[in-house]
Structure formats: structure tokens, C-alpha cells
Image: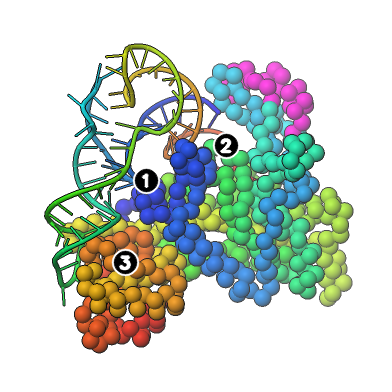
Amino acid sequence: MADVKLEDIVSLCKRRGFVFQASEIYGGLAGFYDYGPLGVELVNNLKAEWWKAMVREHDNIFGVDTAIIQNPKLWEASGHVAGFTDPLVEDTVTHKRYRADHLADTDSNNIEELTKLLKDKKSPDGNPLGPVRTFNMMMKTYIGPVEESESTAYLRPETAGSIFTNYENVRETMRAKLPFGIAQVGKAFRNEISPRDFIFRVRELEQMEMQYFIKPSDQDKTYEDWRDFAYKFLTERLGIDEQNLQWHEHDENERAHYAKAAHDIYFKFPQGFKELWGTHNRTDFDLGNHQRFSGQNLEYFDEETREKFIPYVIESSVGVGRMLMAVLTNAYVEEEINGETRIVLKLKPELAPYRVAVSPLLKNKPELVKKAREVYDQLKQKFGNVMFDDNGNIGKRYRRQDEIGTPYCVTIDFDTLEDDTVTVRNRDTTEQERVKINSLRNELV
RNA sequence: GCGGGCGUGGUGAAACGGCUCUCAUGCUAGCCUUCCAAGCUGGAGUUGCGGGUUCGAUUCCCGCCGCCCGCACCA
């Protein structure tokens, strides 16, 4: 089928209650989005699936949920205060912005030093440069009611930081031995210069991250394993087509300050192949820095070899919003049915906002409605996410469910009253099957 | 942040310096309907925000906000 357009996804999200612009009635706020009733269901399903695969199915991976605001020293140790506070200069003619340290060809972040170095330099376009200014990508806030510099804190720019600071706590309380992992799902905040592409690049995002602590000698094998895990999760658990996925290895220039190696899985978003899930070898960068900055001993003692060392870390990191967008894009299909176009979300049944919709064939026959309500109540107990719909005609209801990805529609007709059977209509094939009410629980999988 | 384009019911579109801003679809109420958006009769719902020009602005001008594209950025 033709490539999915971004506007199709945006329109569907709005129309059907997946994603709304934040503060929409006030004109919105760039880089912020809200999940609607269906979006939150789908997102919760995605997170639950990840948590299950990552935490529940691994004996040696433990979950945490840490504070969004941490001691600011954490971000000094992590390199974010330095790495996020980019010194920028502006071309006074074209108003293009450049990294001052790049133009000056230095590692320094010092404003005075950079100003000195760039004093007689021109921009790449040959124009004079404006003053060097810092641009901090971390969102600042204040602790306490008074805005004093002493009370400055940051909203976390990633969830990984506070996993590292809990490394020792988790190791100790869970009596964990290497290798083991710590996983977290949570919000992070970044002052993106220009948020773009709907929910792809945003200023408030939710991450699903896992940091796997290992012996340095295991780094290559473990790195490979977690790359496999990510790929399998996307294809097998989320049903994403392989043709929509691509591997991308970071070269030296692309890598984050903490990473020795980085592989991303790219997904074919409406705006092209873009980063979805990263696997990084962070080495002992983080724990090493935290040991140095905090003065706390974070070494691991290996009973077998009687050695002490700082564990290496392999990170697996994926954004919830991007995963949602990928799943929607992957599932979005427009197809011909009886000469008309229908939009259908071919979501895996476990992920769909509603597992099943229940309808009486006709609305103006009380005995059908009553029976349909009974079936609805039963299924509701089993699945929880069940919708009742008796508005309009039956075809209209089917199409409505198609568009929100409900895999099954159960219809109660006059035969139901005689023999307790219903029709189960399949979203993808549109075919119907006659099924006993008692066996419905097992059919709708 | 720079440059360009755009902003009209929920969605997708049309029109206009003035007359009740139009259409489709969706939503909704009633009727009808024995399986794929049928039909009939009703209903609610729109010019992003602020200012200016004007007798009068959704239309023209300015600012802001937002969205999309390109550049830069993406730890």
C-alpha cells in the first residue's frame, strides 16, 4: 500500500481520541501533547508489554520508578550540565546559529575563552559573529517558593541518570550479582530547539529504559543480545513489519558523550526512517563519574575472581511516544471494501484500546439490546476494555471499530435468543463466524 | 533559532471588505433497518489569539501562538 502520510496519522489521532495538542483551547504549546482516551489505553498496553518482556520475564532485571527532580549534582556527573549547556554564536547577517566550541575548534565550554578565540573569526558564510551565549537543553525549575540560584534544579533529561544513582541500592536490596539490570518507564524533559513531526520530537517525553550492568569482558556479547531483544520485541511483540525497520550504527560524530558504541533501530515513520530504539554501550562512564562526583564507592566485588571493578553498562532505550507513532503508522491501512475506502488499524489484539465491541443487530428490538447488554457485561469482566455500541446500523459500527483497531465485533441477533450463538466479525478479514457465547472468552484472542 | 508555506464546525474542504459563512463527512435525537458508513425528519457545532485600518474585518496590515517543509540542533 501507499506510504502513510503524517497528516493521516495526526487526523486520526485527533478524530478518534488518541492524541490531542496540549492546552489546545489556548492555542497549544509547542512540543507538548496529551493522550486522549484511546491513546492512553494503547500507550498503557505498550508500556505493559515492554515491562512484561523486560522486567517480568527476566529474573535479573528489576524495576524502579524514580523522582523526576534529582540532586543537580547528578547531572554534573552525568555530563549533562556540560553537554547540555551548549555555547552558541549567531551569524549577525544570516542569523544562523553555530556551536561556538565547534567554530573555535576547542573542547572548552568557557564563555570568556570562547569569546576570545572567536574574536576575529567569521561565520562559515563569512559574516561577523554575535556574542557567545549558552543554550541549556535541560529544563530548569526551582525548589522552594523563592527563585534563588541556590535552589535551581533540573527536570531530568533522561531516565537513565537516576538508575545509576540507585545501582547500589538495587544491587544490595535485591542481592543481585552481575549481570543484572534496572529498568524504568518515565517522563523526561528537554528544551528542544524545534519540536517537530507531531509526537516524534517533543519537549516532554516518556522513555522506557533499561541499564544492564556487566563485567567489562562481557560487553560485546551483551551489546549484541540487547540489540536482538529490541528487534524481536518490535517485530514479535508489537507486530511491526520488518520492512519498516532498519539498523543504524552511529559513527564517532553521532555518538552521545557517554557512549562507546550505539546502534539504533530506525522505523519508517511518515517523515522517513528515523530513530526509534537505541542500544548503547555506556562502558563505566556513568558509574565511574558518579563514584568520582559522589565520593561513594560503586565498585563491584567479584567473588570468583576476587577482583574489584566498576561495572560496564549496556543501555536499551526507547521512547513511548515514538513507539506509539510507530505502532499506529505500522497498523494504519486504507483499503477498498465494497467499493468504498475503509481505514483500519491492524493492531495486535493485545495492544488494541478495545479488545471487542458488542452490538445488538437492531437497536429498536429491546430483546436484542437486553441480550447484548448481558454479553457485554460478561466480556467486560473477562477483558475489561470492551465497548458497547448500538448507534446507527451494524455496518457503521463495524467501520467505527475498524478505525480504532478493535479486533473483534460481537453481534447479537435473533438466532442468539434461540441458541445462544453470536457472530464474531474479524477486523482484518471482515469475515464472520458463528460462535457459542460460552466459548467467546477463548475465541477473542 | 533562521527561511518558506499554512491556520474556516470534530475531520476534510469552499467562499467573501457588509446580506443568517457554504459543503461533505462525522457526531447527535427520533423513525426505519435481520450483518459492512443505506434512507427519512430534526439538532448541536466553525473563521487560532491580540491589536490596527475601516461606517463595517473571517477577508487587508502588524504582533503573538500553533502546525508543516528546508537549514541548524538532536546530549
Q: Are marks 2 and 1 on the same chain?
A: yes
Labels 2 and 3 in the same subunit: yes
> Is residue A186 at all visible to an observer of this figure?
yes
- Label 3 environment density (alpha carbons within 10 Å; few <14, some 14–19, many ≥20): many
Residue at horizontal 61 percent and vertical 53 percent from the top: A187
Taking the magenta stretch, the answer to whether it contains residue A126 is yes
Occupied quadrant, residue A355: bottom left
The chain letter for the residue carrying disc 2 is A
Say which amino acid is labelled 3: Asp
Which numbered mark, 2 or 3, is in the foreground of this view?
A: 3
Q: Amino acid at mark 1?
A: Glu
First along the sequence among labels 3 and 1? 1
Q: Which residue is mark 3?
A: A389
User: Could you tell me which secondary element the residue under label 3 belongs to?
Assistant: loop
Q: Say which label, 2 or 3, has the lower sequence index.
A: 2
Instruction: Say whether residue A342 is left or right of residue A226.
Output: left
| Quadrant housing the N terminus of chain A | bottom left
> Disc 1 on helix, strand or loop?
helix
- Quarter location, residue B8: top left
Residue that numbered label 1 is attached to? A7
Q: Is residue A9 visible?
A: no
Q: CA distance from mark 3 to mark 1?
A: 28 Å
Q: Give the main secondary structure of the magenta stretch.
A: loop
Coordinates of residue A406 in the picture (x, y in percent): 36, 66
What amino acid does circle 2 point to? Ile
Between disc 2 and disc 1, whose residue precedes?
A: 1
Neighbor class of circle 1 (other Cα within 10 Å; few <14, some 14-19, many 20+) is: few
